[in-house]
Amino acid sequence: MFFDSWMSLGRTAAVGILAYLALVLLLRVSGKRTLSKMNAFDLVVTVALGSTLATVLLSTDVALATGVLAFALLIGLQYAITWLSVRYPAIQDFVKAEPTLLVHRGQFLRGAMRQERVTEEEIQAALRAQGIAAAEDVEAVVLETDSSFSVVRSPQTESRSALANVSIASPEADGGTSGER
């Protein structure tokens, strides 16, 4: 239970070093995007790579070559999907979600919040993390495609270029944006 054999420890150390080096090499060859957190698809690949590494390390039923092939397959698929999504908008639309506006000019957009399953308390936490005391002090809070919040302070000028690709629903279409729950 606490110790099987020196052979199993040696195997874990040798396979661990080689699998780790193979993974680092494959990640370097494939580029920075492979481990990005740009969307849910990227997260799935990152988790799958970690799970594969753990399986290769701890399971004597999985050979190192099989694990390296699994790494290459996951990274290759990730590369192919991202390559295609950059070139074909339909694939990008399928793989990547759009950012969602949750607060606009200090008003909570309750319909969007319900659709994205985000609470007012979560948005307030994002505001506090940015050093903002009140929703009225922000132009927008956007739920990004990687599930992070972007907070845009109320502008000193009328420039809103950071919101160029975020659709802004009118408060009337949202079902009301007042403070009621």
Image: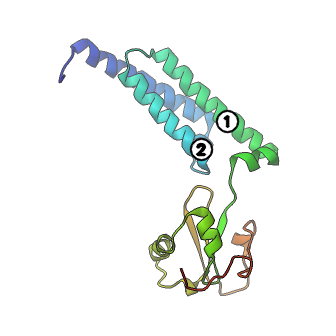
At 44% across and 29% down in the image, what residue appears? Answer: 53
For label 2, count other residues whose C-alpha is less than 10 Å away and answer few (under 14), some (14-19) or many (20+).
many
Work out which quarter of the rendered image holds the N terminus and state it: top left
Q: Is residue 26 above or below residue 43?
A: above
Which residue is denoted by mark 2 in the rendering? 42
Residue 142 visible in the snapshot? no
Residue 174 image position (x, y, % from top left): 69, 76
- Under circle 2, the secondary element is helix
Question: What numbered label is drawn on residue 79?
Answer: 1
The part of the image, by quadrant, that contains residue 34 is top right
Residue 176 image position (x, y, % from top left): 66, 82
Q: What is the three-letter code of the residue carrying label 1?
A: Tyr
- Under circle 1, the secondary element is helix
Q: Reading the chain from its start, which is encountered first: label 1 or label 2?
A: 2
Q: Is residue 137 above or below residue 162?
A: below
At 70% across and 38% down in the image, what residue appears? Answer: 81
In the picture provided, is 156 more to the left or to the right than 46?
Answer: right
Residue 20 image position (x, y, % from top left): 44, 28
